[in-house]
Image (tube, rainbow, N blue to C red):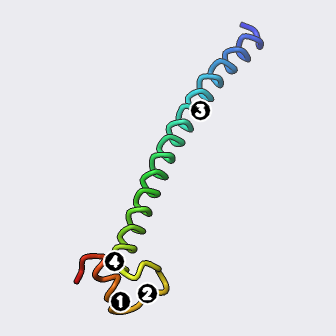
Amino acid sequence: MSFRFFLEFYQICWMFESHSQQRLAWDDAAEARIARMRAEAQAAAQLRAMLIANPSGSLGHARMNDAQKLKEAGLL
């Protein structure tokens, strides 16, 4: 057996290993996309909940006991 045979065998093994690592990277990327979609959906739901909980309609500029907004929200 020659050195060339061992070199080719090593290259084939390395190719299979690199393909395996690439598949793992693709799986990780798919899981990251799913996690990002879940996080964005959760953030949107939290924003909706914050807007519902704040009847004046503008976060940071809320007024206490805004009768008009409370009536629009169905709380009065």
- Looking at the image, residue 56 lies above or below residue 5: below
Cα–Cα gap, marks 3 and 2: 51 Å
Cα–Cα gap, marks 2 and 4: 10 Å
- Badge 1: how crowded within 10 Å, few (<14), some, or many (20+)? few
Cα–Cα gap, marks 3 and 1: 57 Å
Q: Secondary structure at mark 1?
A: loop
- Looking at the image, residue 22 lies above or below residue 5: below
Report the residue marked by disc 3: 22
Cα–Cα gap, marks 1 and 4: 13 Å
Report the residue marked by disc 1: 66
Q: Residue 39: x and y, percent? A: 45, 57
Towards the viewer: 66 or 49 = 66
Q: Amino acid at mark 1?
A: Asp
| Mark 1 in CB contact with mark 4 (< 8 angstroms) | no
- Looking at the image, residue 57 lies above or below residue 12: below
The label nearer to you, 3 versus 2, is 2
- Badge 4: how crowded within 10 Å, few (<14), some, or many (20+)? few
Left or right: where 47 falls relative to 17 = left
Q: Residue 58: x and y, percent? A: 47, 79
Task: Return the disc, 1 or 4, that comes first in the chain's sequence.
Answer: 4
Which residue corresponds to the image point at 75% horizontal and 9% vertical from the top-left?
Answer: 2
Q: Secondary structure at mark 3?
A: helix
Q: Residue furthest top?
A: 1
Q: Amino acid at mark 4?
A: Ala
Cα–Cα gap, marks 3 and 4: 46 Å
Left or right: where 53 falls relative to 22 = left
Quadrant including the C terminus: bottom left
Cα–Cα gap, marks 2 and 1: 9 Å
Which residue corresponds to the image point at 39% horizontal and 67% vertical from the top-left?
Answer: 48
| Mark 2 in CB contact with mark 1 (< 8 angstroms) | yes
Please give the label number shown on residue 53. Answer: 4
Task: Return the disc, 2 or 4, that comes first in the chain's sequence.
Answer: 4
